[in-house]
Image (cartoon, rainbow, N blue to C red):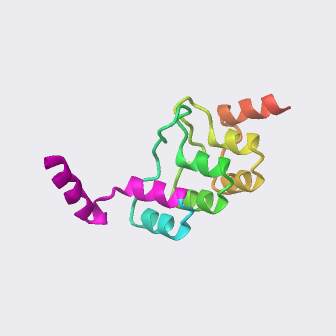
Amino acid sequence: MLLRFLFGLALLLPTSLVTAKETLIDAFLEKDLATFQRALEKGANPDFYLDDPQGLTLLMQAIIEGKNDFVRALLTAGVDPNSTNKHGHGVMGVAITTGNDEAVRLLVEAGADFRNPTTQSFLVALY
């Protein structure tokens, strides 16, 4: 009985209690760029690791999925174009290995450093 009451109460909670991180992830998953950008404009922090074994960032996941409008939004919001996952692999390496040329261009325009050791290791592995 108590559990049913608490569950019913949870359904009545306002959506404003949803965290900014959850809003970003939901908008990303639903490909809702407008909501994603609004959350960023309101100050949602996009610098976090996703809950996956690779420890990817949201920027990395956007690159992997080819969601370049989201890549652009994240970089415009100030996400570091030289950021790394939990294991130290750089975002530029992800863009190069996935063949996402548009993401490579966006990262370069945002100031990605090709001298970054993680980027160089990916370039050496490719050639």
Residue 13 in view here: no
Q: Please name the predominant secondary structure of the magenta segment in the image.
A: helix
Q: Residue drawn at (70%, 53%), measured in percent from left and top?
A: 103
**Figure check: 19 above or below 89:** below
Q: Residue drawn at (57%, 62%), measured in percent from left and top?
A: 31
Residue 36 percent coordinates (x, y): 49, 64
In the picture, measured across the screen, residue 61 lies left or right of residue 36, that is right
Seen from the viewer's position, the closer of residues 41 and 114 is: 41
Seen from the viewer's position, the closer of residues 1 and 15 is: 1
Placement of the C terminus among the 4 image quadrants: top right
**Figure check: 65 above or below 89:** below
Q: Is residue 66 magenta?
A: no
Going by the picture, which residue comes out furthest to the left?
2
In the picture, measured across the screen, residue 90 lies left or right of residue 34, that is right
Seen from the viewer's position, the closer of residues 79 and 12 is: 12
Which residue range is magenta in the image?
Answer: 1-29
In the picture, measured across the screen, residue 24 lies left or right of residue 110, that is left
Residue 25 in view here: yes
Residue 26 percent coordinates (x, y): 47, 57
Q: Residue drawn at (57%, 31%), measured in percent from left and top?
A: 88
Q: How many marks?
A: 0
Dividing the picture into quadrants, the one containing residue 109 is: bottom right
Residue 22 percent coordinates (x, y): 40, 54
Residue 70 percent coordinates (x, y): 59, 60
Q: Is residue 18 magenta?
A: yes
Q: Residue drawn at (46%, 47%), measured in percent from left and top?
A: 47
Dividing the picture into quadrants, the one containing residue 13 is: bottom left
Going by the picture, which residue comes out furthest to the front?
1
**Figure check: 49 above or below 9:** above
**Figure check: 77 above or below 90:** below
